[in-house]
Image: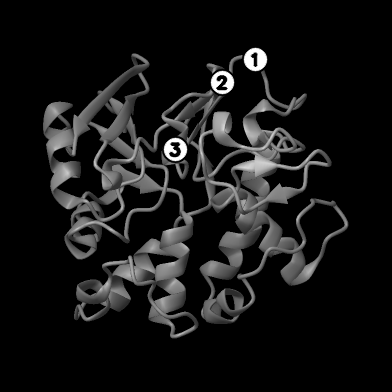
């Protein structure tokens, strides 16, 4: 199907009403347009249940990549983790269609190319990877998430090690790094290991660490753009047109942002 418009929305975080306002502002039509999301569909907002039900109802007109909050929901629902105090997941966890929604959610990848020049991922592109490598590694995780025994994968998903990539990584260490790079990464240490503590704007961060998108990536082609979320404190400031930050902190009282891929225009609504 050829779509009239292709949109990519930043972190929704269960903010159902904000999502509806944004789609209305963009004149989104599920019959004519395609909507992608950069992950974190659920969590701190007022209505994660309605958000997932609505997005699922869009059928093939919607696709997403998974964020850390989406993976955490899967772990909580499988009793591997307890809900965080800030999360507002109980109505979703109590819903009669919870299993249907979770089975739908876990079919989505950690990274996806939406066309030749645009790749979406929740946290970012680790600078030693090309976008093709990113998608291939995402597929490794998807094989586990989409299997009958996906809860076994979730049990070993949590942890900060290994912090640095090697092609020789195997098993749960390999998949954990892939998950962390795709869903949790913000800053890197000088040796390109993942730094998990700092969540601020780069201007407030230690000079010993650097945002992932400031590290030279020789694998990224000049015309490619990476569309990501996860980092509200960034205020969309990457100073590099190849990296488009779409988490603008709606859940923190700021804005929800969507990119019109056809025009490059950003559409926003205030919280």
Q: Nearer the viewer, mark 2 or mark 3?
A: 3
Q: Are marks 1 and 2 in contact (CB under 8 Å)?
A: yes
Q: In the rendering, which numbered label is found on residue 233?
A: 3
- Please tell me whether mark 1 sits on a helix, a strand or a loop: loop
In the rendering, at what x and y percent does residue 101 appear?
Answer: 30, 68
**Sequence order check: which comes first, mark 3 or mark 1?**
1
Q: Give the x, y percent position of residue 31.
A: 17, 37
In the foreground, 194 or 79 = 194
Quarter of the image where one finds residue 178: bottom right
Q: Secondary structure at mark 2?
A: loop
For the point 42% across and 80% down, the residue is: 82
Tell whether 17 sits left or right of 119: left
When the figure is inspected, residue 242 is found, relative to residue 113, above or below; the finding is: above
Q: Position of residue 266 (x, y in %)?
A: 31, 21
Disc number lying in front (3 or 1):
3
Residue 168 at least partly seen: yes
- Label 1 or label 2, whichever comes before in sequence order: 1
Report the Cα–Cα distance between label 1 and label 2: 8 Å
Q: CA distance from mark 3 to mark 1?
A: 26 Å
Q: Tell me how far mark 2 sits from mark 3, CA to CA.
A: 19 Å
Q: Residues within 10 Å of mark 1 (few under 14, many from 20)?
A: few
- Cβ–Cβ below 8 Å for labels 3 and 1? no
Label 2 belongs to which residue? 242
Would you say residue 107 is visible in this rendering? no
**Outermost bottom residue:** 79
Question: Residue at coordinates 20% horizontally, 78% vertically from top-left?
Answer: 95
Q: Residues within 10 Å of mark 3 (few under 14, many from 20)?
A: some
Q: Which residue is mark 1?
A: 222
């Amino acid at each position: 199907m050829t779509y009239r418009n292709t949109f990519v929305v930043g972190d929704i975080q269960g903010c159902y009403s904000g999502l509806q306002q944004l789609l209305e502002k963009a004149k989104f039509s599920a019959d004519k347009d395609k909507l992608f999301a950069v992950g974190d569909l659920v969590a701190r907002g007022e209505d994660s249940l309605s958000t997932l039900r609505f997005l699922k109802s869009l059928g093939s007109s919607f696709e997403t990549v998974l964020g850390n909050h989406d993976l955490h929901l899967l772990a909580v629902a499988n009793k591997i983790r307890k809900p965080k105090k800030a999360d507002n997941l109980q109505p979703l966890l109590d819903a009669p269609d919870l299993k249907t929604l979770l089975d739908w959610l876990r079919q989505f990848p950690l990274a996806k190319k939406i066309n030749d020049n645009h790749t979406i991922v929740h946290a970012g592109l680790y600078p030693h990877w090309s976008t093709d490598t990113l998608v291939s590694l995402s597929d490794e995780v998807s094989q586990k998430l989409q299997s009958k025994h996906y809860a076994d994968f979730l049990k070993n998903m949590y942890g900060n090690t290994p912090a640095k990539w090697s092609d020789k990584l195997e098993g749960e260490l390999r998949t954990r790094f892939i998950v962390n790079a795709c869903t949790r990464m913000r800053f890197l240490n000088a040796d390109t290991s993942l730094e998990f503590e700092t969540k601020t704007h780069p201007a407030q961060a230690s000079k010993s660490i650097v945002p992932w998108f400031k590290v030279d990536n020789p694998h990224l082609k000049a015309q490619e753009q990476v569309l990501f979320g996860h980092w509200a404190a960034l205020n969309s400031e990457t100073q590099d047109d190849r990296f488009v930050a779409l988490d603008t902190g709606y859940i923190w009282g700021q804005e929800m942002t969507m990119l019109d891929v056809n025009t490059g225009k950003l559409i926003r609504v205030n919280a």
